[in-house]
Image (cartoon, grey):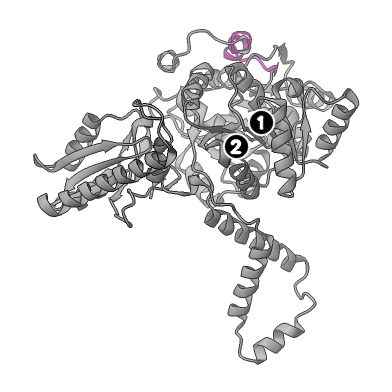
Amino acid sequence: MLLEAIRDLGFTEPTEIQVRTIPPALAGKDLAGLSQTGSGKTAAFALPALQSLDLSRGEPQVLILAPTRELAVQICSDVELLGRKIKGLRAVTCYGGAGIDQQIRQLRKGMHLVVGTPGRLLDHLRRRSLKLTAVRMVILDEADRMLDMGFQEEMDTLLEALPEYRQMLFFSATMNKAVEKLIRRHGNEPETIAVERNVMTVGTVVQRWYEVGHGSKIEVLARIFDRDRPRLAIVFCNTRLRVDEVTESLTMLAFSADRLHGDLSQQMRERVLGRFRRGNVKILVATDVAARGLDVDDVDLVVNFDLPVDPEDYVHRIGRTGRAGRAGCAISFVSGRELRRLRGIERFIKHDIAHAEVPTPDELMVRQKERLLERIEKRLKTTPEPAGVEPLERLQAEGVSWKVLAGTLLELLGESEVRPCTRIPEDQPAHLQFCARRDKIRSPAGRRDRGSRREEGKSGRSDRVRAHARRDTDTGMQAHVINIGRRDGVRPSELVKLLHGKGSLPKGTIGRITLYPTHSVVDLHRDQAPQIVRSVKTHKLKGRRLKMKIHQDEGGAPPRGNVKDGVRD
């Protein structure tokens, strides 16, 4: 069953860490594997762990410790993927920051494999919701990182609570004195296996791409920084001139940014890198050559301001984040024909990069209010009775309620701290963005002035909207927008099959279908439309969760569509 799952996943040859660790692990030996994240070590310990399970026993038999919840979730996902052919397999993740009650309910149902962070696993152990009496294999992934994060005591307590006869598998990026002490204390003469790193992309890095025109890149970049507030970020550009332009633009917007490229002297480069490592500079704008060999573990975000031409450069760039098991994020700005280059990168790294929507001003305002509330809660915990309440009491005496007063103060604070957003074309609905881009395309008939092309574009859009309206009144058809389009690889026949199959529709219900890059417009008969809209929400096509809504003619504008969490509202 495991071999069948491996074949289905497309794996043909094992990595070096898998070749060297799986045989001794299957033989029941303790081992210490020295390997970087991304070398295939998850499968190296997951396959022996799955092979050792006795599914007739509904209690934890394999325990996997990870330093962060992101890595724990990733490991559990990989385990479930490798074990998807094993009927009845049950695995659960236990980590802090999530509701413990749900985890307790899952553990009580009976689990074969448990993945978690040391702190939360110890919490379950003390609550007696986690029983370790049947555990026969224990895996410590990123052992050095767990020790660096201060989990020494939790790890010792957990490992001492295990049965005396169990198999220990240690995986670490480095072998320092702390790791050696841990292995010596809890291992049974483990075999040490060290391999070189050979990886395309790091599994702990979340990869996304935004469709952004060149003129909007700085604004979108600023919005992402405002929303995510990364500790350290690297912005990659393809040329030195672009590095200078981006650095100056970010500095003018009051961001802490500095540049790194080949025109800088070695002394200046070292000074910039030193400030970045210490956190005095939060954003480093760099070229590929200048950033080669850059080793900073705390980089949260990598931005491809310019999409690299060579897919290998993409791998090197995003490798600057998500290091040593830490979570990281890699964002790419893509526009026009660069989409083809992005698909080439996806094929090279053998991984799909998720599309995301540009943050809106409203989204940034909501996030800022959330941060303000967090700061207020933190201040109240340390200073329950802050000074300066006398003026507020005077306002209350004049009839102003505390609720209104607090809301007003939050609004004023939010307005004072939020960077004013510049309106960009990407703030428009997807239909208008597409039409604006199309208007810039030169006609095959030859050169014409921009005004005439713009007028023709407006006329064409109005004609299409009027055509939709005529079909509404003349035939009882109603135009609907669905959040899937040409860029998703969908065809009209697939939409027809989906709507007929899922909605059980009579013939003649579906009218004209128009595909756009990010969505489609479908004419549906008014009588069946509500049933179809409800049905579509429960299904997926091309991996996308679907959603439909009625086409709205807003002053001649094409249908609106904002995507949130993969669903177009």
Is 436 placed above or below 497 here?
below
Residue depicted at 40% across the width and 16% down the height: 8
Residue depicted at 38% across the width and 50% down the height: 569
Is 423 placed above or below 184 here?
below
Q: Main secondary structure of the magenta part?
A: helix
- Say which residue label 1 marks: 322
Element carrying mark 2: helix
* Camera-side mark, 2 or 1: 1
Q: Residues within 10 Å of mark 1 (few under 14, many from 20)?
A: many
Kind of residue sitting beneath label 2:
Glu
x, y percent for residue 217: 59, 39
Place residue 515 in its image quadrant: top left
Is 384 placed above or below 402 here?
above
Q: Which residues are magenta?
A: 18-32
Q: Is residue 204 magenta?
A: no
Residue furthest to the left in view is: 507
- Say which residue label 2 marks: 70
Closer to us: 392 or 51? 392
Residue depicted at 33% across the width and 57% down the height: 554
Q: Residues within 10 Å of mark 2 (few under 14, many from 20)?
A: some
Place residue 509 in its image quadrant: top left
Q: How many marks?
A: 2
x, y percent for residue 326: 67, 33
In the picture, measured across the screen, residue 287 lies left or right of residue 347, that is right
Q: Is residue 21 magenta?
A: yes
x, y percent for residue 431: 37, 44
Closer to us: 344 or 36? 344
Q: Earlier in the sequence, mark 2 or mark 1?
A: 2
